[in-house]
Image (spheres, rainbow, N blue to C red):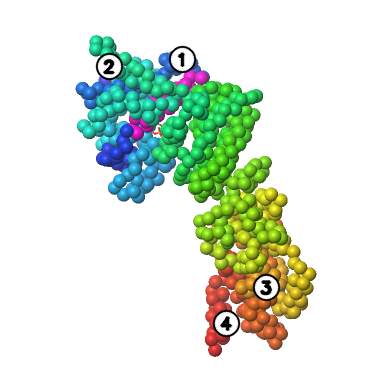
Amino acid sequence: MESATQSFGFQADVAQVLKLVVNSLYSNREIFLRELVSNASDAIDKLRFRAIEDKSLLEADTPSIRIQTSKENKTLTIEDDGVGMSKDELVKNLGTIAHSGTQHFLKVLEERGGKPDLSLIGQFGVGFYSAFLVADKVDVISRAAGSTEAWRWTSEAKDSFEVAPAEREGHGTTLVLHLKEDALEYTSEWSVKDLVQKYSDFVSHPIEVLTPGYQDEPAKYERANSAQALWKRSKSEISEEQYAEFYKHLTSDWEPPLAQTHFKVEGTQEFAGILFVPKRAPFDLFQRDHRRGVRLHVKRVFIMDDAKDLVPEWLRFVRGVVDSEDLPLNVSRELLQDSRIAQTIRKQVVRKSLDLLDELAKDKAEDYAAFWKLFGAVLKEGLHYEPENKARLAALLRYGSNKLADGEFSSLADYKTRMPEGQPAIYYLTGESRRALEGSPFLETLAKRGYEVLFMTDAVDEWAIEALREFDGTPLVSAVSADLKIEQTEAEKAAQEEKSDALSGLLGAFKTILDDKVSEVRVSSRLTDSPVCLVVPTGGLSAYMERLLKAHERNVPDTKRILEVNPDHGLVRSLRTLHEKDPGSAQLVDFIEVLFDQALITEGSPVADPQRFARRMTKLLESAAH
Ligand code: ADP
């Protein structure tokens, strides 16, 4: 006979998590029950899902979760009729961590110094190990559905664990927690019932707790949760706490959500759901392989997590559950992709999410501001991807501006109420940060006219705003655009022409010297304090966008921009004199090249040849110092 018990080493990450958990003095350790019941519930969900194809797998009519406690043995036992685990699965699932967030989790814990916040534990896919918050030894006896073999996994939270053959009636998993001396309160069936009600009432499978009989009566299992899918209950019956607990169960978040919406749709199609906006951004929000989607049920049966086709990319922060009466039970991700029913659900998910955000913006400005900070950049993507919702999305946009204090944000509608008479457009400027934009020469003329300029500092902004073009009948115009749509008076026009004529010789010299760098040189009406700036011809990319694209190694054609020269600037006037005296002046070439590079620097672009720029600058400074 082969030796029965085998020993396996824990993966290093697991050993580290275990060490943290087992030694922690975490005060809210009762969450272990929520995590373990949640695993048991998932296991039953998985079984029901597999039984759609193979009915023989389902041995019990109503699979349940059963909990019993023993004061004598100092144990707490959680049993489920779920899919169970084979020997290999026990070794893999309970000995390694597949979840990509684990390293991040460990780092977060480390950063918090000696006091790790273990309520994070479920979120990082390591909920099982929370058993060691209250137990110093755990046995897991499991039998995979469809198999006759059972195995026992045992660990004392050391570097290795053991697996040995075992007996178990029926498929499923039994967890025996050998409680720590200071955790014996969990041997009371009352405290267990309380915890089930508090954390797991909405778990959609029966949770039963073994309760001693009265006097001579035998102990019997008593139902401890209502086991009704929360989304099927009427809103008026559900408390905020219940929504919050459901959200935590669903997402393993440790905080309640920022907001939620609970809906039922009846008509040609029937479905219900609850959508949540979290209070914190997940760490993968801007990673390429981010999570997205809601949990899908069909007629209460769990079908899949993260159903991507029900939630668009630009609402990837939305979490929740949708339960359809019309999708087939055997719906797969592929089928979902082409399903008309799924498309209808997706539309409603979008609609309900936007309704929720509208409401938040209207009634809870502070919460909306918090939301916007976290997820605004994601929501903006919708402008591009979903033109049919443009108007609704536009109402949700918020930006800082040259007229708002740092940290203040305005909607486009509010911006419009502040527009002085005659302002022809909503102006905006894109760039890395508020600080980079505040000193921009592009603000000069607009600010002088009393026009407000919105600051757009998210990488997606320029790309997103391009899809909008106008808001409520007013065009959106970039402050770097060649055409600011500002109507000049006849007098202004005449003055500008006069300045152009007077400066034509110098402008010609600019054009000759910068011929390969700019498409045009012209007199500016937008500058007051700066001598020159570069503006973008209609349809061209702004310098900021160009830099962003280049940073992502996209092949971007260089847009030749227009150099605008401020005719009233002292330096420009001196150059004009210099040019008139000696049109072939070598110093004039240096001045013009340096001014061009300066225009690049003020807009945040790199100069092509910094050494040459520095040499020229030194030469000019030297002559000025004489
Ligand atoms: P998570 O549940 O987030 O994946 P856990 O650490 O809680 O992380 O569990 C690890 C894995 O162990 C689960 O993904 C599941 O495959 C398996 N598992 C845990 N508990 C059970 C159970 N009661 N029945 C079947 N499988 C389970």
Q: Is residue 534 above or below residue 146?
A: below
Q: Where is residue 552 in the image (x, y as percent from the top left)?
A: 56, 54
* Label at residue 212: 2
In this rendering, which labeled residue sits more in front, label 1 or label 3? 3
Q: What residue type is labelled 3?
A: Val
Residue receiving disc 3: 565
Instruction: Considering the whole magenta stretch, tell me its main secondary structure.
Output: helix
Q: What residue type is labelled 2?
A: Pro
Rounded to the nearest angstrom, the CA distance separating label 1 from label 2 is 34 Å
| Residue at point 67%, 74% (across, down) | 566
Q: Is residue 441 visible?
A: yes
Instruction: In this rendered view, identify the residue nearer to me: 594 or 257.
Output: 257
Under circle 4, the secondary element is: helix
The quarter of the picture where residue 138 lies is: top left
Q: Position of residue 231 (x, y in %)?
A: 51, 27
Rounded to the nearest angstrom, the CA distance separating label 4 from label 1 is 89 Å
Rounded to the nearest angstrom, the CA distance separating label 1 from label 3 is 82 Å
Residue receiving disc 4: 620
Under circle 3, the secondary element is: strand
Packing grade of label 4 (10 A; few <14, some 14-19, many >=20) is: some
In this rendering, which labeled residue sits more in front, label 1 or label 2? 2
Label 3 CB, ligand 1: below 8 Å?
no
Q: Position of residue 38 (x, y in %)?
A: 40, 29
Q: Read off the magenta span.
A: 31-52
Rounded to the nearest angstrom, the CA distance separating label 2 from label 4 is 95 Å
Question: Which of disc 2 and disc 1 is earlier in sequence?
Answer: 1
Asked if the stretch drawn in magenta spans residue 73, the answer is: no
Question: Which of disc 3 and disc 1 is earlier in sequence?
Answer: 1
Under circle 2, the secondary element is: loop
